Amino acid sequence: MNRALRPAILATLTALVLLVLSPFALVAVNAVKSPDEYATDGPLSLPNGLHLEGIADFWIRVDFGEKLFNSFLIAGSVAVLAVIVSVLNAYALGIGRVRGRYAFLVFFLLANLLPQEALVYPLYYMSKEVGLYNSQIAVVIIFTAIQSAFGTYLLSSVYATFPREMLEAAAIDGAGKVRTLWRVVVPISWPSLSVLFTFFFIWTWNEFFLPLVFLISNDKQTVPVALGVLQGDRLMDATTTSASALLGILPAVLFFLIFQRTLSRGVMSGAIK
Amino acid sequence: MRSNRGYAAFLIPGALLSLVVIVVPLLMNVGISFTRWQGVGTPEWIGLDNYTRLLEDENFWASFRNIIFLIVAMAVVPTLIGLVLAAVLFDYVAKEIGPRTASALRSGFYLPQVLPVAVTGIVWGWILNPSFGALNAILTNAGLDGLAKNWLGDPAYALYSVMVVMIWFQVGYPVVMFMSGLQRVDPELYEAASIDGAGWWRRFTRIAIHQIKPEIYVVLVTTTIAALKIFGQIFVLTRGGPGNATLVPSYFAYQNFFEKAQVGYGSAIATVLALIIVVLSMLFLRIQARDEQKDAA
């Protein structure tokens, strides 16, 4: 390509990236302004120093620490449980090649793709019947099923190419199927499992629809639900809204930075959603 | 030889879980869609009435018309932009300027994708707010008061505003997918084409796009399904309004389930949506299987 184009291309790309990132910058800049400052200087001025009261007030008002804890509890439990269920399923389907495995795989793939709207009312009704409505346990159980459906689909194809010699060696050593799974299959596929764990955690953290329906009392809500239901509230002015957006963005960006390596590896190996 | 028997037991926990959380609720949902039910008392069997009512419901058609717009915003436009960006980043920036610059730019485009959907709604709900939003303030500061609009509250602009938000949210995903796909392209193919005098654009259209077809398929299908399922952003940004200007099937179902207590009708909407998604996925699996056979042959 023409050398003269180089600055033009670089400038265009940089401008595009800055445009994509500008909402983040707007949020960050205005979350640390006082309401008066926003009223006089508008959204584009740089803040006169750090005014953290808006963030602190909002944190206390929604008890954000509690929301963070709830999100960690739910996303963490789902990630651990869904990885375990995925491993068990994939062991049977990918390594054990049980009969009808193709039908099972199609089922698990479709189960993950189904719109949650087609499950929500019966789940809502059933959870009320068994006393699990407005309980984080119901949300954990449901997401364990949905996430492990995807995990099973992905991990089964990983396990289908698992080195047979290692399984046979374990069998010769007298290891049963449970022991082989625990001592051979799990340690060797650990990188895939950590990718799955990462995905499950972030996906569950980001979920909105089912937690919105199931977690109605304030003290049970997750970060996205607590922030989402407040929109349109008359107490939410410009700086408070940016403060709330910033509190929603920070954990997500933090996970992104921590997990970036795992994530990009996972996205590239075809784990898609 | 190790016997393949005895593995089925490992499926039991997963199968039970799927049965309780997915199979039974799905069948119940289909069953409820043939009834009139308020969520309490006994459902009353009314056959296909909910479905015939759907066909005459203006809101139902509006929700699917809006979904077509959102498929354009979430699948078509990001794929096209993603192809160009990925090609420029991979083929030009990474080679001429450096792979670090390319991956930094890629991360920048991808960042919106890591946000919870509800949080993207909060960010943009504020930016587009007519009275205290950043966009109108910026326009007014620039002396362009005439361009300041009630972006989400005016039926003439609401759907387009949501579309722009969704393009912003989605564009990083195809960029990342296509850049990783391009790494598979044999550099010799490119060199051979260059020697034959093929310019950058010809190499891009003839080689790159052809080679990353699987990624393009995957991106188009997953983003189309994501568009069909969109809920969080609509809930936070517009609640389907004004009127039905941004109504989508999932929010339409939610309204009937939890706001109007028309559970049978909501189930019918959800069933139609599920059917469309399942048919689309099966179609995709077919095409993929056929292509793999063709490649193997």
Image: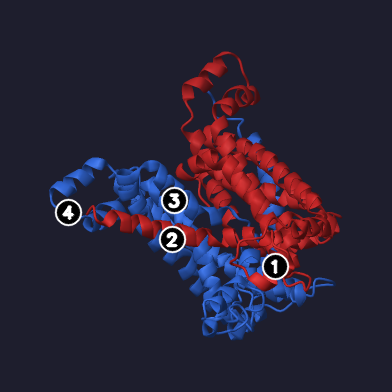
Chain colours: A red, B blue
Q: Amino acid type of disc 4?
A: Ala
Please state which of the two labelled residues, at mark 1 or mark 3, is closer to the viewer: 1
Q: Is residue A116 visible?
A: no
Residue of label 2:
A16
Q: Which of B235 and B9 is in front in this view?
A: B235
Between the residue at mark 3 and the residue at mark 4, the CA separation in whole angstroms equals 27 Å
Q: Amino acid type of disc 1?
A: Glu
Please state which of the two labelled residues, at mark 3 or mark 4, is closer to the viewer: 3
Q: Which of B17 and B156 is in front in this view?
A: B156
Residue of label 1:
A37
Q: In which image quadrant can residue A9 be found?
A: bottom left
Q: Mark 1 lies on which chain?
A: A
Between the residue at mark 2 and the residue at mark 1, the CA separation in whole angstroms equals 29 Å
On whether disc 2 and disc 1 are found on a single subunit, the reply is yes
On whether disc 3 and disc 4 are found on a single subunit, the reply is yes
Between the residue at mark 4 and the residue at mark 1, the CA separation in whole angstroms equals 57 Å
Residue of label 4:
B198
On whether disc 1 and disc 3 are found on a single subunit, the reply is no
Q: Which chain carries label 3?
A: B
- Label 4 sits on a secondary structure element that is loop
